[in-house]
Image: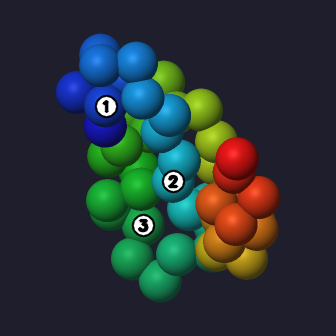
Amino acid sequence: MREVKRQGGLTIVQDPEECQVKTMTSSAISATEIDKILSADKIIEFLVNLK
């Protein structure tokens, strides 16, 4: 995620409260600024609506 941000990309992670295993999401949030923290359904909705 740090490299994605460094390259100017958009970072999205699943809401840790929704995850069965929170380790990867929590690590990403700790490592860098995350643009969007969304539920799985909201991630799908966001990606489908990208233009």
In this picture, is 41 found above or below 17? below
The answer to which of marks 1 and 3 sits earlier in the sequence is 1
Count up the numbered dots: 3
Tag 3: residue type?
Answer: Lys
Does residue 2 appear in the picture of this structure? no
Q: Tag 2 or tag 1, which sits nearer the N-term?
A: 1
Residue that label 1 marks: 4
State yes or no: discs 3 and 2 in contact (Cβ < 8 Å).
no
Q: Nearer the viewer, mark 1 or mark 3?
A: 1
Residue 3 position by quadrant: top left
Distance of label 1 from label 2 (alpha carbons): 12 Å
Q: Residue at x 48, y 39 (%)?
A: 11
Task: Left or right? Give the position of 5 relative to 43.
Answer: left
> According to the image, label 2 marks what residue?
13
**Mark 3 secondary-structure assignment:** loop
CA gap between label 1 and label 3 equals 20 Å
The amino acid beneath tag 2 is Val
Observer-nearest residue: 6 or 34?
A: 6
**Nearer the camera: disc 3 or disc 2:** 2
**Rendering coords of residue 23 (x, y %):** 33, 62
Relative placement, left or right, of 38 versus 21 is: right
How is the protein colored in the picture? rainbow
Dot 1, how many residues are within 10 Å of its Cα: few (below 14), some (14-19), or many (20+)?
Answer: few
Q: Is residue 20 left or right of residue 24?
A: right
Residue drawn at 40 percent across, 18 percent down = 8
Instruction: Work out how far the residue at label 3 is from the one at label 2, CA to CA, in angstroms.
Output: 11 Å
The three-letter code of the residue at mark 1 reads Val
Residue 22 — which label?
3
Element class at badge 2: strand
Quadrant that contains the N terminus = top left
Q: Residue furthest bottom?
A: 20
